[in-house]
């Protein structure tokens, strides 16, 4: 149970510094690198619509899927406010049946790392393959195992101010499970407005992944030409210092 209402309501405040425009530029750069001109995009784990809204404004026809109703409610509200047409669907990306094909499936902001079991990863790859037209692309970013092991997550505190004058403070306590390739990220979030404080807790199990296991899952699902890149970079090879990696399967 992650991204429940209380955490979802703090999500955009906590990631107000995330450069979604730059990430969408990177997605389009990958389209160009693969000499591909898609028109329809399926966004697995669309969250509050950070990438979907920008890509829709750029002319793509977007369908977003997420298992958190609270996150989807925020995404729908933003799309309605901006007058952007996006189909948002509540569902689990390991088993949803959309009965349609897309040129591209994207899954951004480590959504694939939320698939913590081999069965879940295999199911997402299989479903992505079923949803893509022949020659289409599946692209996602995730935690890169070698870098996570070398530079283990550490406790952190993040403090931001919301547009409504609230102070939002998130305390992060990670616990690394090397055998299962999982970091249990324990979040405690405070929202402070005047003299009022609300508090919520969530634990997000995150799997760090290795290129060859990803390649295996994608090849079994039917993908070819599988490429790995440092996230937001197309000009250098992936190294042990790259905490986030981008994966593209054709």
Image (cartoon, rainbow, N blue to C red):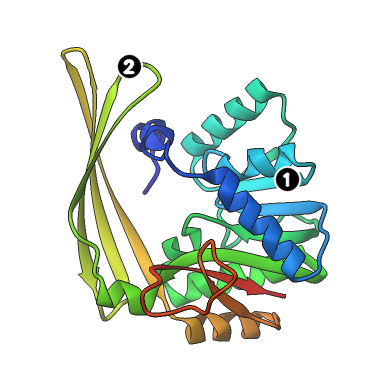
Q: Measuring 83% from the left and 60% from the top, which residue is drawn there?
A: 37
Residue placed furthest toward the top: 194
Q: Nearer the viewer, residue 216 or 17?
A: 17
Which x, y percent locates residue 62? 73, 45
Q: Is residue 46 visible?
A: no
As measured in the structure, the alpha-carbon distance from the residue carrying label 1 to the one carrying label 2 is 32 Å
Q: Does residue 97 appear left or right of residue 37 in this picture? A: left
The residue that appears at 57% across and 34% down in the rendered structure is 75
Q: Find residue 157 and report its horizontal and vertical position in percent.
A: 20, 44
- Which mark is in front, 1 or 2? 2
Where does residue 66 sit, x and y in percent of width and height? 55, 47
Q: Residues within 10 Å of mark 1 (few under 14, many from 20)?
A: many
Secondary structure beneath dot 1 equals strand
Find residue 34 and report its image quarter.
bottom right
Residue in the picture at 64% in, 52% down: 25
> Residue 216 location, x and y as percent?
56, 86
Query: Looking at the picture, does residue 199 appear above or below residue 15?
Result: above
Tag of residue 176: none
| Label whose residue precedes the other's in the sequence (1 or 2) | 1
- Seen at 63% across and 50% down, the residue is 24
User: Residue 184, relative to residue 235: is it above or below?
Assistant: above
Label drawn at residue 165 = 2
On screen, residue 232 versus residue 127, left or right, reads left
Report the side of 92 relative to 148 (left or right).
right
The reply to whether residue 178 is in sight is yes
Q: Quadrant of the C terminus?
A: bottom right
Label 2 residue SS? loop
In the image, 19 versus 121, the foreground residue is 19
Vertical relation: 229 (above or below) 200: below
Which residue lies under the disc numbered 1?
A: 62
């Amino acid at each position: 149970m992650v991204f429940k209402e209380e955490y979802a309501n703090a999500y955009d405040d906590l990631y107000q510094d995330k450069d979604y425009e730059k990430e969408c530029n990177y997605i389009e750069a990958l389209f160009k690198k693969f000499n591909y001109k898609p028109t329809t995009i399926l966004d697995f784990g669309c969250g509050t619509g950070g990438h979907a809204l920008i890509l829709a404004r750029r002319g793509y026809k977007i369908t977003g899927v997420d298992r958190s109703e609270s996150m989807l409610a925020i995404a729908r509200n933003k799309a309605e406010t901006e007058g952007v047409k996006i189909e948002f669907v509540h569902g689990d990306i390991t088993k949803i049946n959309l009965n349609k094909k897309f040129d591209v499936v994207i899954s951004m902001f480590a959504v694939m790392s939320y698939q913590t079991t081999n069965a879940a990863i295999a199911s997402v790859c299989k479903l992505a393959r079923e949803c893509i037209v022949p020659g289409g692309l599946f692209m996602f970013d995730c935690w890169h195992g070698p870098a996570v092991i070398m530079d283990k997550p550490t406790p952190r505190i993040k403090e931001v101010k919301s547009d409504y004058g609230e102070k939002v403070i998130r305390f992060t306590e990670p616990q690394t499970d090397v055998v299962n390739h999982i970091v249990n990220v324990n979040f405690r979030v405070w929202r402070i407005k005047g003299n009022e404080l609300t508090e919520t807790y969530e634990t997000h199990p995150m799997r760090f992944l290795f290129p060859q296991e990803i390649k295996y899952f994608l090849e079994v699902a039917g993908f070819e030409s599988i490429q790995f890149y440092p996230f937001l970079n197309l000009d250098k090879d992936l190294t042990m210092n790259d905490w986030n990696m981008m994966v593209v399967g054709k």
